[in-house]
Image (cartoon, grey):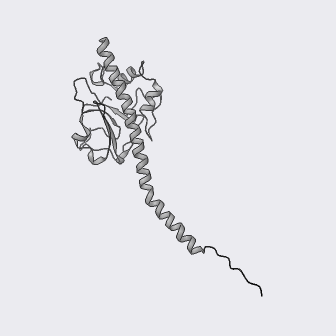
Amino acid sequence: MKLIKRLTAFTLIELLVVISIIAILASLALPAITGALARGQMTQTMSNMKQLHLVAQQISLDGSTTGDTNLAWPGDLPTKTWAAWAGIITNGYMTVADLAKMCSAPPITATSNNVVSSTPGTTRAIIAYQVSETNDSAVVIFSSSNFTNQASPTVPLATGKPYGAKGFVVFRKGGDGAVLQNNQATNTNVVGGFAATLD
């Protein structure tokens, strides 16, 4: 008598159950993954702000040493515009290409063609403020362009680039920065004070 071996395999129902469980787990993990990605991008923006802060300090020190009034904190410049300050930066402190990298954050890509005279939120991910030598160290010198502190109430723009409602980045004159959530926008102890924008 011949023995018939029975093949063991997954049934269609078992296979569908396993696929359903994997899909549910993936949908639960997706918000955490995208949130971590956004926080990583905001941390990179804060690092870029640190580089720009170091350049701003160097420009100010050079102005104090040489007596050149065109080398100063952004708020002490004769012409208080982004184009004027970016022109100083790209005149020996940083290349135009490097400045463009510093002012980029997904989905905003600053280019060498537009970074010197660019508009925040469209071709530049960073807003600079008119911080001067006399300002306190807690005054914000840079913020991500989705938070300008100009709206009322002072909250990040939900549809603003680069981060929308995911959060925003600020960097203060004293050399410290933070990646913050939207509910921290009105807390001046956390964020710091603001001068007028440099745009």
On the rendered image, what quadrant is the C terminus found in? top left
Q: Please name the residue shown 41% across and 38% down the image.
A: 44
Relative height, residue 26 to residue 167 (above, below): below
The answer to which of 16 and 160 lies nearer the viewer is 16
- Quarter of the rendering containing residue 105: top left
Instruction: Please identify the residue farthest to the top as the structure is shown.
Output: 66
Q: Position of residue 168 (x, y in %)?
A: 34, 42
On the rendered image, what quadrant is the N terminus found in? bottom right
Can residue 70 be seen at all in this image of the molecule? no
Relative height, residue 56 to residue 21 (above, below): above
Can residue 31 be seen at all in this image of the molecule? yes
Relative height, residue 159 to residue 74 (above, below): below
- Quarter of the rendering containing residue 3: bottom right
| Horizontal side, residue 37 vs residue 190: left or right | right
- Quarter of the rendering containing residue 172: top left
Relative height, residue 168 to residue 85 (above, below): below
Q: Please name the residue shown 35% across and 38% down the image.
A: 145
